[in-house]
Image (cartoon, helix red, strand yellow):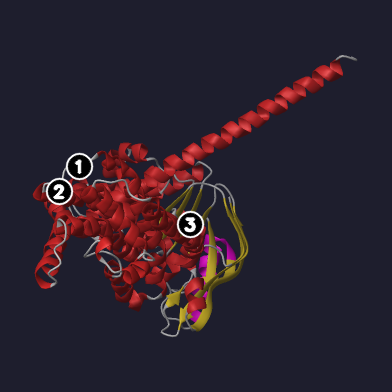
């Protein structure tokens, strides 16, 4: 009996240890299950959104490609003919701004209509509505993936060969996605809070393109203009794409970190706010 | 198990009388507020089926949305234990440009199934909904009854322990009403809960044994369905509120 106590304590300690391990294992499993569930929900919302926004069949791809190609065509005429500022490979330079901007712009536009679009679901069942703006961005990311073809075409036209710097592409794409998601959450809330001001919000995002080095690279702007343009989070994004595809260089840390941090700050500020507001979406759209 | 303690749901309106969220109300000039439900306390145990009776605007749909987790209580406490299946509008959560199959897949995942489970359940949804070749067509080509059938079939395949029905079953044909009744009875027999609102009292009497009479967002009476129904019909008739529901 005397030795039983320490043995019992040792057993208790072992059992307590294994309980803790089980709890840790249980928590890990719960996290894995939650992550799997998030992926499933995002996939389901995005697949439905793609059908809803872009229809089905071969014309889907045509729709994804039409906008960026048309925009590059129009801005190319503006830059080379009207403004007479052709610079280096102007078509490729424009594509390096238009393609990433399209993801941000269309992500915002989609997120602004996403709650109303899903009103029949929101008023009929409970689900994780916090994922809706993210799924809007993922929907546009599919179209964005197709529009990367535009950059490849422009590289071919101007005879610009890819360099090892292209290995930075996943990092640049991540920054692009984070910034687009960062804009999507406040855009979605804005559309609900100020329904009649939705067109102004879209115009504001469009203005950001022109308040950044969208039409001409940053290196072709004046020093004073550059200081202002660098405040725009899109500037670093556009320049990073140009570094990769036009100049064949690795993007600078500032060009990557500033838009990334900007997107993160927007997410940190607006996702909790969105989470609080989503509890009342059914009241607002019902 | 469902337990509600002094639960309330509040609606805020802006000056154009549109419903706004709390966040929007802080940013905009608030017009007015009203309580859709207030001071609701009740419990529904396993194996119970409850009908919600009351005039239009009495709070039946608001209560069903609250139980379904679509609304969160603005005051009080609500405890709902069990997997919930809902059919709360004729639209049944369907997006009109998607086909029946695409909608069923999306709704299955949103209701809690994995994508693999939702995909595997598609043939069951197709056969339960009796849609046949319409299952592959856009929902925009469906009648209201067909939409409700698809919505119910999806809700059915998620194996709900708590089934919430709001009037939509009244848009269904006789054949599918029997399917719903059979399914509802099965859920109750398995220890689940069914809560149904509507104006078809004959059907509610077949589905439910207990009733809550809702009036102005609160519970006016709670008891066996026949007694509550009779009291409701008598009160509605004596107030001259028109012909009571059959």
Label pair 2/1, CB-CB below 8 angstroms: yes
**Secondary structure type for disc 3:** loop
Question: Residue at the location (45% across, 74% down)?
Answer: B20
* Residue B91 visible in image: no
10 Å crowding of disc 1: few (<14), some (14-19), many (20+)? some
Q: Nearer the viewer, mark 2 or mark 3?
A: 2
| Residue A177 in picture, x, y percent from top left | 35, 52
Q: Nearer the viewer, residue B150 or B223?
A: B150
| Image quarter (top left, top right, bottom left or bottom right) of the N terminus of chain A | top right
Counting residues from the N terminus, which is met first, the one under dot 2 or under dot 1?
A: 2
Dot 3 falls on which chain?
A: B
- Magenta-tinted stretch: B222-239
**Secondary structure type for disc 2:** helix
Q: Nearer the viewer, residue A203 or A241?
A: A241
Q: Nearer the viewer, mark 1 or mark 3?
A: 1
10 Å crowding of disc 3: few (<14), some (14-19), many (20+)? many
Q: Is residue A207 left or right of residue B212?
A: left
Q: Is residue A2 left or right of residue B97?
A: right
| Residue B202 in picture, x, y percent from top left | 41, 61
From what the image shows, is residue A250 above or below residue A55?
Answer: above
| Residue A217 in picture, x, y percent from top left | 24, 61
Direction right: furthest residue: A2
* Residue at which label 2 appears: A155
Mark carried by residue A162: 1
Mark carried by residue B68: 3
**Secondary structure type for disc 1:** loop
């Amino acid at each position: 009996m005397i030795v039983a106590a320490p043995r019992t304590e040792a057993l208790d300690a072992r059992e307590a240890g294994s309980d803790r391990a089980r709890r840790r294992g249980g928590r890990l499993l719960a996290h894995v299950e939650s992550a799997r569930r998030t992926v499933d929900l995002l996939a389901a919302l995005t697949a439905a959104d793609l059908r809803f926004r872009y229809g089905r069949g071969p014309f889907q791809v045509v729709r994804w490609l039409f906008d960026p190609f048309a925009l590059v065509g129009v801005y190319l005429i503006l830059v080379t003919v009207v403004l007479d500022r052709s610079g280096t490979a102007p078509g490729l330079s424009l594509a390096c701004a238009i393609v990433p901007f399209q993801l941000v712009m269309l992500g915002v536009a989609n997120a602004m209509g996403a709650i109303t679009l899903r009103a029949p679901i929101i008023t009929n069942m409970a689900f994780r509505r916090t994922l809706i703006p993210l799924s809007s961005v993922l929907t546009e990311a599919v179209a964005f993936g197709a529009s990367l073809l535009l950059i490849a075409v422009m590289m071919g036209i101007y005879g610009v060969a890819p360099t090892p710097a292209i290995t930075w592409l996943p990092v640049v794409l991540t920054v692009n996605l984070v910034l687009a998601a960062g804009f999507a959450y406040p855009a979605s809330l804005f559309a609900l809070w100020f329904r009649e001001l939705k067109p102004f919000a879209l115009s504001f995002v469009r203005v950001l393109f022109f308040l950044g080095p969208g039409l001409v690279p940053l290196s072709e702007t004046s020093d004073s203009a550059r200081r202002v343009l660098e405040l725009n989070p899109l500037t670093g994004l556009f320049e990073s794409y140009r570094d990769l595809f036009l100049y064949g260089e690795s993007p600078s840390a500032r060009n990557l970190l500033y838009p990334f941090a900007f997107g993160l700050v927007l997410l940190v500020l607006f996702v909790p706010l969105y989470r609080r507001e989503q509890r009342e979406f059914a009241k607002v759209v019902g | 198990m469902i337990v509600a303690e002094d639960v309330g749901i509040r609606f805020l309106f802006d000056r154009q009388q549109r419903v706004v969220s709390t966040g929007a109300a802080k940013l905009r000039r608030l017009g007015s507020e009203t309580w859709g439900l207030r001071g609701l306390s009740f419990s529904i145990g396993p194996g119970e089926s409850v009908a919600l009776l009351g005039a239009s605007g009495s709070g039946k749909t608001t209560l069903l949305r609250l139980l379904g987790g679509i609304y969160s209580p603005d005051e009080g406490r609500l405890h709902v234990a069990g997997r919930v299946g809902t059919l709360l509008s004729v639209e049944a959560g369907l997006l009109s440009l998607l086909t029946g199959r695409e909608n069923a897949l999306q709704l299955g995942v949103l209701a809690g199934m994995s994508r693999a489970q939702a995909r595997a359940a598609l043939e069951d949804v197709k056969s339960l909904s009796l849609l046949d070749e319409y299952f592959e067509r856009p929902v925009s080509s469906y009648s209201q009854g067909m939409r409700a059938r698809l919505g119910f079939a999806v809700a059915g395949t998620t194996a709900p322990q708590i089934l919430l029905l709001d009037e939509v079953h009244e848009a269904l044909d006789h054949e599918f009403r029997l399917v719903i009744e059979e399914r509802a009875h099965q859920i109750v027999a398995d220890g689940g809960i069914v809560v149904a609102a509507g104006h078809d009292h004959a059907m509610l009497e077949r589905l439910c044994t207990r009733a809550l009479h809702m009036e102005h967002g609160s519970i006016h009476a709670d008891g066996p369905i026949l007694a509550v129904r009779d009291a409701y019909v008598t009160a509605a008739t004596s107030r001259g509120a028109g012909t009571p529901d059959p």
